[in-house]
Amino acid sequence: MFENAKEFDKRKAMTDIDTEIANNCRAWPFEEARQVIKRLRAINKGEIKPGPKGYVLFETGYGPSGLPHIGTFGEVARTTMVMRAFQRLAPGIPTKIICFSDDMDGLRKVPTNVPNPELLTKALGMPLSSVPNPFESDHLSFAAHNNDRLCEFLDSFGFEYEFLSSTADCYTNGRFNDALRIMLEKYTEIREAVLPILGAERTETYSPLFPIVQKKSVDDHHPIILHNAILREVIDADKGIATFEVLDDSEKERSGYSAGETITQSIFDGGCKAQWRADWALRWYALDVDYEMAGKDLVTAADIAAKIVQILGGRSPAGFRYELFLDEKGQKISKSKGNGLSMEDWLTYAPHESLAYYMYQRPTTAKKLYFDIIPKAVDEYIQFVEKLPEQDPAKKLENPAWYIHDGTIPNAQHTPISFALLLNLVNAANTSDPATLWKFIQAAAPDATPESAPFLDRLVDYAIRYYTDFILPEKQYRAPDARETAALEALATTLEGMDSGLPAEEYMTEVFSAGKDNGYEKDELRDWFKAIYEVCLGQSQGPRFGSFIKLYGVKDTVNLIRNALNGEFTKAA
């Protein structure tokens, strides 16, 4: 997928698609990339150039209060696709993706799925980068552990990115200081940009900036973000010194600060944390982000952040608002509800390339994400992979596989067998042994081996797991009726006279003939195919049966049909 990105021949990558062809492409990554170009022209007097930072910056965000998930994967994958489109539209301009971890954010509640929760209970209100590490790892903080997991996660898929810590790389090292100074100077304007979306009570207490203080009566380092403090006076904007007043006692237990107390300190070098809407704008402005997408649930927040960037004197990044995933009932997927698919679920039963393909499809349309869609997504991905090498350049840019593999399909990624066929092979062979399945595969595709076709080898393992967990429990054989019996008997007899190793279409022709010759009209052939699967495999659908015969073998298919006609499967059930 995004594998070997750092070793990829960039000169070839930038010239494999003619710029004119790229300019005419209407696939959504190119439409998004054109918005980046529009932004560059707007801030550079019509020129397409990156500005002082020297590169075009694509950003994705991550909240390290939890582990990376399917949304993290989708955002990085889709952003990578947009960057690749931009590289073809403007091949001479350097690009970079950063994954920004908001690890300066405060710990709001103790997660239910972590060890040693008592460590976190005592750390409520602390920046995540200062929260003790409850995991059995060597990392110094809760955020450091999760940040490392994020990088492992992204690295495992071959993403090319630069990690950026909000704490270490932006707040405490002074990178945000200049932008924070402007925020102090324009505090009232920024606050007023946010107030219209807040309720009456929150309007009275809202502050775009929170001071970070040392907890009173604690000798050890114990920073607390005072979410209940509001700016009262700017003492020296150039040095970031300001006075904040604590509004109530809601955080007294955590911080030791009571209502009415004031704190005068510099907000520079880690002395504050911006409220999350203002923080989003802060990094857009300070880093000069050119592109960042966000979920539809953040539309209002993104609009507010864009206004704040404008107040700071910058221009907000390009980026669309993608739709959220739904479960099979059409309900929004929620981690707390546990509905829908998780990242781990998908990767248990299918390759990550198929998930990238699913992420490519219609990102601004809500899509259902549940187990039944996995086989279809895998096989559609395979079909696009097989088409890409033979397509002309314009057609390549309409192919999702081009965006997943940056225009070049690795040789090891091809497979002569579809996922649906593998699922039926596991069913018919009644085995969970990969070696046994490979004997059938090599009979149909003699050149294929686990070593020469590693993607196919991965699919074998996925097919075994998917079949075991989802197909096997639902299998329901039935006895054939008289017409079905006659047609199946005719098919078995015909196959007995045929050689193995013939093209799948020759077997499929005989499947059609057996149905037509035994009472199935043209408009009833779908019923005939359904009967084959229900009687012989205990399921209502599958791939073309001619392809199954070629893979499973003529002799074994005849035995399968005979056993079904003799009632062996219904007896066992």
Image (spheres, rainbow, N blue to C red):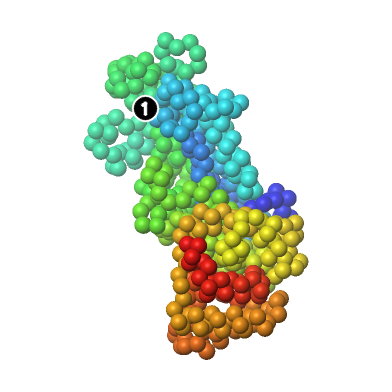
Residue underneath mark 1? 227
Image check: 452 left or right of 484? right
Q: Is residue 331 above or below residue 188?
A: below
Around disc 1, counting alpha carbons within 10 Å, would you say few (fewer than 14), some (14 to 19), or many (20 or more)?
A: many
To which quarter of the image does residue 87 belong?
bottom right
Quadrant into which the N terminus falls: bottom right
To which quarter of the image does residue 311 belong?
top left
To which quarter of the image does residue 337 belong?
top left
Q: Is residue 491 above or below residue 229?
A: below
Residue ID at (35%, 17%)? 253
Q: Secondary structure at mark 1?
A: loop
**Coordinates of residue 49 in the picture (x, y in percent):** 60, 52
Three-letter residue code for mark 1: His
Residue ID at (31%, 16%)? 258
Camera-nearest residue between 533 and 159: 533
Q: Is residue 67 above or below residue 226?
A: below
